[in-house]
Amino acid sequence: MKKITVRKKPKPLYRQKVPMRPTPLGLNGHAAHSLPESTASALRENLVAPYAVHLRPVDSNAYTTVDLFCGAGGITEGFRRAGYSCLYGNDINFWAIETFRANHPNTTADNRPIEKVDAAALRRSLNLEPGELDVLVGGPPCQGFSINAPERFLEDPRNSLFKHYVRFLNEFRPKTLLIENVPGMLSLGGGVIFEQILQALRAHGYHVQARILFAGHYGVPQERWRMIILGSRFSPPPNHPYPTHFATARANFKGGKTMTFRLLPLEQTALLPAVTVGEAIGDLPRLGMGEGGEIVAYNRLAESEYARMMRAGAAVTFNHHAGMLAPQNAERMKFVKPGGSWRDIPHYLLPKGMQKARKSDHTKRYGRLRNDGLAGTVLTKCDPHWGAVFLPDQDRALTVREAARIQSFPDSYKFLGPRVAQYEQVGNAVPVLMAEAIARELRLSLDAQETISQNCHVA
């Protein structure tokens, strides 16, 4: 029988106290190629060898993951912070996988379409037997789900991406699983599709439960919700991490009242305060439009604990360039106060379509962030027409680095590719600190499984 090694628990989550416990649709980087296929193919030949899978050394005492639809690596980075080793990551987006590879050099990064990956061959190349992998991670897109015939959604070829996640699940038989998506998946097919996803996982021997988590609850300075499904081959299923930070936001979607952690006012004294936009990005070099660069030295002190954590002692950061706004947007921005939106802009300056909008519509468009609040959901485009991207106290839009800070990526995490691809990678990612909180909760489940197995072995 395989020798059981009991792993030591890692250091606690950033600023975490331990209280009592109870993505655009799931893209996570699995979008269309950022480059034309001819260009991407040429770059692959010269820069990477994405079609070969190589065994890479990992920490033998760390729990292991395989990350499907990995994007730029938000989940893998969070799990790394929690002491896990990712063996393999796959994504179809060329620049996302390049970013993943650059920041996780000891992990095999694969740019093939998931349907072209032989799960059995991959498992053998990683020297894993079925049942040895600790966590299978994935955010399979589900925009192809048929709401007209939800009872047949697994047979619909448009839903092959979820089917491929199940294919890897069958082959690897991981001890635990994580699936992430947007809360909107609850509305597909009137909720029937979501239930069938859970049924499919249970049919393959997994005990599962789902919750909608709020990023602000885990020290992320952002209003971002994610559906998180956790499962285990052993009963009971893993718990979802209870909030460590007191943050509130409207959960105006299906499941908002029943599947989220709803904090009580009394809990404000027991939890840490929410991390604000000012704490998150206020220390980064101030820029005018057109200033900055791909490598920028700090010129201000990091005054918040969050900023110091993001810097981690580094002298420079990356991807901090302030793009130019179109003249009409630069003019509109002047009228928007912190926390304001398009409603602050004179009617004659608004786009034609917005001139007909009701004041209650599109509340984030042409918005300016507040230093003392949370940011809205970081989008895949830094476009004021779609969200709040203006800085609280600088007349410009967010840089990639500022967006990455709001997603809790450390400053050493470098995003590759054209700037439009960098914004896309950041916006599609799962916030790192949220992923870390989930990873630490999964570790409790894995530790318990190992203790039981060890006791059985001794007996």
Image: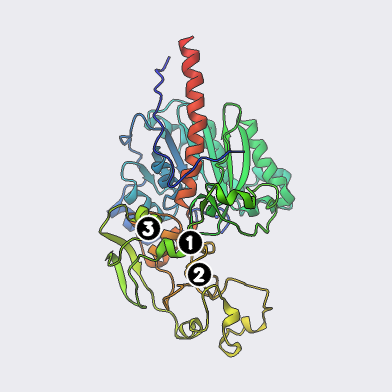
In the rendered image, which residue does mark 2 sit on?
370
Q: Please, what is the three-letter code of the amino acid marked with disc 2?
A: Arg
Considering every residue shown, the one lying at the far bottom of the view is 348
Residue 67 seen in the current view: yes
In the rendered image, which residue does mark 1 sit on?
276
Tell me the element at label 3: helix
Badge 1 or badge 2: first in the primary sequence: 1
Q: Nearer the viewer, residue 320 or 301?
A: 301
Q: Please, what is the three-letter code of the amino acid marked with disc 3?
A: Ala
Residue 307, disc? 3
Tell me the element at label 1: loop
Q: Position of residue 235 (x, y in %)?
A: 60, 27
Q: Position of residue 352 (x, y in %)?
A: 61, 85
Q: How many angstroms separate mark 1 from mark 3 (CA)?
A: 11 Å
Binning the other alpha carbons within 10 Å of mark 1 as few (below 14), some (14 to 19) or many (20 upward) gives: many
For residue 235, side relative to residue 380 (left or right): right
Binning the other alpha carbons within 10 Å of mark 3 as few (below 14), some (14 to 19) or many (20 upward) gives: many
Q: Please, what is the three-letter code of the amino acid marked with disc 1?
A: Thr
Question: Residue drawn at (50%, 70%), measured in percent from left and top?
Answer: 369
Question: Residue drawn at (31%, 50%), measured in percent from left and top?
Answer: 48
- Callouts 1 and 2 close, C-beta under 8 Å: yes
Binning the other alpha carbons within 10 Å of mark 2 as few (below 14), some (14 to 19) or many (20 upward) gives: many
Whether 419 is drawn above or below 119: the answer is below
Q: How many angstroms separate mark 3 from mark 2 (CA)?
A: 17 Å
Badge 1 or badge 3: first in the primary sequence: 1
Residue 35 seen in the current view: no
Badge 3 or badge 2: first in the primary sequence: 3
Q: How many angstroms separate mark 1 from mark 2 (CA)?
A: 8 Å
Whether 141 is drawn above or below 38: the answer is above
